[in-house]
Image (tube, rainbow, N blue to C red):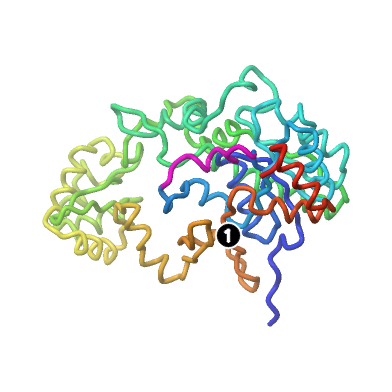
Amino acid sequence: MNTLPLPLDGITVVAVEQAVAAPFATRQLADLGARVIKVERPDGGDFARGYDTAARGLASHFVWCNRGKESLAVDLKDPRGLAVVRELVAGADVFVQNLAQGAAARLGLDAASLCAAHPRLVAVDISGYGADGPYAHRRAYDMLVQCEAGLVSVTGTADRPVKAGIPAADIAAAIYAFSGVLAALLRRANTGRGGPVEVSMLDALAEWMGHPLHQGTHGSAPPARTGLAHSVIAPYDAYATADGEQVLLSVQNDREWRRLAEQVLGRPELADDPDFATNAARTANRERTDEAVGRGLAGLTGREALAGLEAAGIACARLNTVADVAAHPQLAARDRWREVGTPVGPLRALLPPITLPGSEEARMGAVPALGEHTDALLRALGMTDEQTSVLRRDGVIV
């Protein structure tokens, strides 16, 4: 059987992007075969390059979000630099930007302006709070949007709210921008027209807050912060074992509770005890429920507890560290790890979650150095070495 090409093979994307939201969106496009030209500032590039040096001297956020791209380092404030990007956009299928609110419009690089000039273009504006409204021009860093969207209010313990440990607002916006591009490309295939796509971090994360919003706005109180526990299910938490591991389990119905009590805890009487027999009773008596489960697992090692829970058909997991995930047996068994080229040599990276059986494998290209492809891109536009030398001398490119 012939292998199918990647679905975005032949699609060219130009991105004026920084931080996480837009770069993570365009990385998904690159993984699926698109050519992504990343436009960066000559003086340091995407500021995410400087977040840290954890990835063997490179910034971990940048390595994660920018593989498979070509880096063009050009000053958009110089008319000559802006003209280069405009020429690239004229030949592109997709344009993505997440500059500060209003900056793209001042450059004529907002989605509406570009789509009016290029009807087949799909152009994406990613913002913090949207193009209008009282918050439109507010700074919108991930943690701030997590707070504004209410995510922090439902995350953490009863005593302390906490933000998510990953940039949830950025990721939410990125995934909706990615899916918006795919939808607009499909529309273009049917109608011949691309069109603007707008995604805001607040809109994206507010959508992810759907369950708490529906719970809290239709007559009930919003869910309480419960740490690893569940607001309406018990037992549902992490429990310590004899060797210091933390084992998580979730009992979803009363049949599972009976199996847990009889087969794992060794306390069959709990199955019919009216204080524990139903989920409503267990939730009302959460402390006693957790104490019974905790006492039962405390005499087992983590391995023994997991084996017993699985044998009883109880959903369970280990509380893994980042190092545990990097060595996860399931990821290894499914051959999910690859190596990606970077300016400091190959680094391990996971295959993207979208698997297309029968197609080429995801195109996990190298992470570019700042301006690595500037000369090649300008030559492709017809510039001579003398012209690029002048631009480099004047600081327009690197």
Q: Which residue is mark 1?
A: 366
Main SS of the magenta segment? loop
* Magenta-colored span: 42-53
51 relative to 75 in the view: left or right: left
Q: Residue 241 in the image: x percent, y percent?
A: 17, 54
217 relative to 284 in the view: left or right: right
User: Residue shown at 76%/26% (left/top)?
Assistant: 106
Could you say which quadrant of the image residue 75 lies in? Answer: top right
Q: Is residue 312 visible?
A: yes
Q: Residue 243 in the image: x percent, y percent?
A: 14, 56
Q: Nearer the viewer, residue 136 or 290?
A: 136
Tell me the element at label 1: loop
User: On the rendered image, what quadrant is the N terminus found in?
Assistant: bottom right
Could you say which quadrant of the image residue 230 lies in? Answer: top left
Q: Residue 337 in the image: x percent, y percent?
A: 46, 65
Q: Nearer the viewer, residue 383 or 222?
A: 383
